[in-house]
Image (spheres, rainbow, N blue to C red):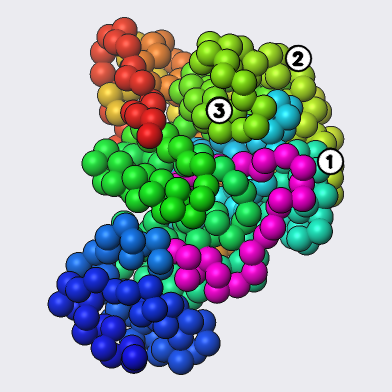
Amino acid sequence: MNIIEIIEKKKYNQKLTKEEIDFFVNGVVDGDVADYQASALLMAICINGMDYEETYNLTMAMTHSGDMLDLKDIGRAVLDKHSTGGVGDKTTLIVGPIMAALGVPVGKMSGRGLGITGGTIDKLDTIPGFSSDVSTENFKNYLKTVGFVDAAQTLSLAPADKILYALRDVTGTVDSIPLISSSIMSKKLASGAGSIVLDVKCGSGAFMNDFDSAKLLAESMIETGKRAGKKMRAVITDMNEPLGYAVGNRLEVEEAVDFLKAVKQEPRLKRVVTVLCSEMYKLSDVYKGESDEAVAYLIEEKINSGAAYAKFTEFVNMQGGSLDSFADNDSYKENLINEGSLFKKELTADDITTIESSGAYMYEDLSAALFGNVSLRLGAGRLRKEDEIDPDAGIVFVKKSFEKIMPGETLMTLYSRDFERLNDAVAMVKDSLKLVSYDNESDKDIILTIL
């Protein structure tokens, strides 16, 4: 067996065996397979695809290429939740504490943002003192004591994926469902959770632009997870509009805090959070067959009682962080607009611009792609992995789709420490944002389907 034969086989659209896939992955990790050879096979897979069995075997080879967390001694069934990424997606910060308050432990490995989709670790890094560098021992301890842990992806988990993803990123082989599926699921399986709920984003601000592609990806990941003995569920959600009121790392933590305090809950964000929590609850060992309405009530009660926010505080404190700078954040949007920023010592008036309406309108299209790129220009995201981000940069929407906008009302506030970036971002918004006469039309459901 050699790598040339394997490349030739997939080039002619033939099915690869488990042994051939193992040989390829092991060779990539050991350095026996050259980058140009790995790239050739990745391109052949991208063009000709893989069936479910091949995708599963590739996933498992990548999963076993490094360490694997064993969470069986936690005492409760551990769940994981994964989002394929979207503009303004801060659901992990909200869902994890709610589930912990419900008695369902959630153990996550999260990443940093690249492009228009933000990374959960970048958001958590804006909390003073917070550390996402968590040892295996502490990962387990936090699950037992707090019920929620979120750590940065380590080099020891699924190292094959890191090598292959770097090659895919520079060889035009990113948009392959078998390769996307195996990349995501290898990390999920190595993280040790027994049940996984997937939030597969679909739309202009998501990696999968259309529903059919999102559904194919969700089905591939579900099949792989089930073959690996995991309980799986996938929710396909709309990402044509930014999720929530805020886009930007520290701003999204602010919004998550207010959501958990029941101060401000943007309706589309609340809908996604409720559905994700419901599906996770139904896969847990605390689920007793309650109705969907009863489960939704339990979720709402954990928020309104303060239990979910208490878990968020406990989670942050356990990982070395402090929420003292968020203590007076009782009116999220109003404080940001009227005072400029809750972090006034770090931002000045020159770092903030509001965009106002000249008449009575509504948004024609509050494009997630547009505002993802606006947030990038402001400094809230990265074009390259080595780029530094401005933790305070971003956007806060005062109005969302299908809300009536009155003359002179503030539509949104933009933040950046770089004056040139701020001016460029404002110009991007004014050049591209379209307003139409107000028509009180009901918005479509952000939940497209549940698999």
Tell me the tag on residue 282. Answer: 3
Q: Is residue 69 magenta?
A: yes
Circle 1 is placed at which residue position? 145
**Residue at the image position 46 percent from the left and 86 percent from the top:** 27
Q: Which mark lies nearer to you, 1 or 3?
A: 3
> CB atoms at circles 1 and 3 under 8 Å apart?
no
Measure how far apart labels 1 and 3 are at the Cα level.
22 Å
Q: Position of residue 270 (x, y in %)?
A: 53, 22
Q: Residue at x 40, y 90 (%)?
A: 34
From the viewer's perspective, is residue 135 above or below residue 368? below
Q: Secondary structure at mark 2?
A: loop
Residue 251 visible? The answer is no
> Which quadrant holds residue 298?
top right
Camera-side mark, 2 or 1? 1
In the image, 199 versus 72, the foreground residue is 72
Q: Secondary structure at mark 1?
A: helix
Front residue of 428/135: it is: 135
Q: Which residues are magenta?
A: 59-85
- Name which residue type carries label 1: Thr
Q: Quadrant for residue 265, please give it.
A: top right
Question: Which comes sooner in the sequence, label 2 or label 1?
Answer: 1
56 in relation to 243, above or below: below
Residue 373, position as x, y percentages in the image:
40, 48
Question: Within the magenta stretch, is there residue 84?
Answer: yes
- Looking at the rendered structure, the kind of residue marked 3 is Lys
- At mark 3, the secondary structure is helix
Q: Which residue is mark 2?
A: 305
> Residue sitting at 57 percent across and 15 percent down?
290
